[in-house]
Amino acid sequence: MMIQGEAIGGPDDLREGEIAVELPARFDASLYYIGRIQTPWKRREDCPKNPRETQAECTIVLDPRWVEGLQGLETVTHVVVLYWMDRARRDLVLQSPHHYSERRGTFALRSPVRPNPIAVSVARLLRIEGNRLTVVGLDCVDNTPLLDLKPYFASTDSVPDASVGWHAGTKR
Amino acid sequence: MMIQGEAIGGPDDLREGEIAVELPARFDASLYYIGRIQTPWKRREDCPKNPRETQAECTIVLDPRWVEGLQGLETVTHVVVLYWMDRARRDLVLQSPHHYSERRGTFALRSPVRPNPIAVSVARLLRIEGNRLTVVGLDCVDNTPLLDLKPYFASTDSVPDASVGWHAGTKR
């Protein structure tokens, strides 16, 4: 089931030590794109490495179909933004992101390369005008498909003392 | 496009004031279930109202296909768990969850009812044994489909002073 050193299921070659698995024969559920995220970054290599590196304002444009779903969201300070990283291959279990020296498991990384390339970002909400939300704290490429918006609850979503052991001594 | 007071696209009747929209004609992307979440709660009405209400241990069982993807995850204290709320209708834009008095927009709520019923929960990781993760802090029904696991980074995921205005005066 493993294929080592051979690219399948995606556009890029594997880096040394990366391991791809055979993807399941069929999908189990399906998604709607509910809008698009407008950002200043046209190519993936231009994007900030993480959302706290930028103060750039981004615009989330919600499909007008869903606009009534925003009622009440104007009262939150932060939004959980789910989006679809549609350019990423989905079959790697071990990978070596270019800014880290060691190979690690897909689920130990926030890399876009994963079986379901759903990103979760916490963005600060500046304003909502009609179907457009202006936020700070996203790092995705321009025109990224939007999947969901949720209110960020500090009571359940914030764990200030959480740690990622492997990252502690790592320089990005 | 709006249908008021009439149930479409889901198993339940609408509550007063709830608004459903017509779903898009086609899907845009697809998901793999990568495992299942074992919890003590067999029915949705038995589940805790939010993940901080329970100290119950839950078991995330990853499909063996993906098990190498866990390498490195044992060093984290908290995991972002994405799962699929497969029993939820997807067409409501305004809804009245039974434990709140007011109707609100779907994107202002953490309700399972949303166009893409993806839940995001932060769970405390107790241990990993093979393809099984023992965690605390999930509130989903037993056998819920798993979509993704990510390391929780306090630097980007934790916003202790975030607030949800509409919720501030609300008793759950």
Image (cartoon, coloured by chain):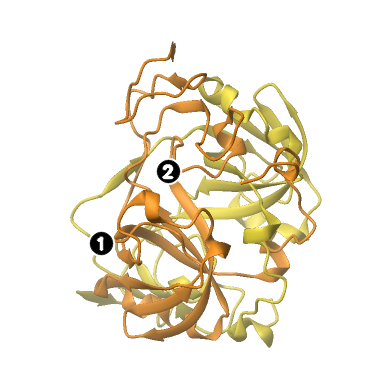
Chain colours: A yellow, B orange
Left or right: A36, with A115 as reference point: right
**Viewer-side residue, A112 vs B5:** B5
Residue A168: x %, y % from top left: 67, 85
Q: Which residue is mark 2?
A: B117
Q: Which residue is mark 1?
A: A23
Disc 1 residue type (three-letter): Leu
Q: Chain of mark 2?
A: B
Left or right: B1, with A70 as reference point: left
Picture quadrant of residue A49? bottom right
Query: Which element type, helix, strand or loop, lies under badge 1?
Result: loop
Foreground tag (1 vs 2):
2
Badge 1 and badge 2 both on one subunit: no
* Residue B27 in view here: yes
Residue B47: x %, y % from top left: 42, 56
Relative vertical location of residue B79 with respect to residue A138 in this rendering, above or below: below
Left or right: B8, with B56 as reference point: left
Disc 2 residue type (three-letter): Pro
**Residue at figure coordinates x 76%, y 53% from the top left:** B162
Question: Spatial distance from mark 1 to mark 2, Cα to Cα?
Answer: 23 Å
**Residue at figure coordinates x 42%, y 62% from the top left:** B148
Q: Callout 2: 10 Å neighbours few (<14), some, many (20+)?
A: many
Q: Chain of mark 1?
A: A
Residue B59: x %, y % from top left: 36, 74
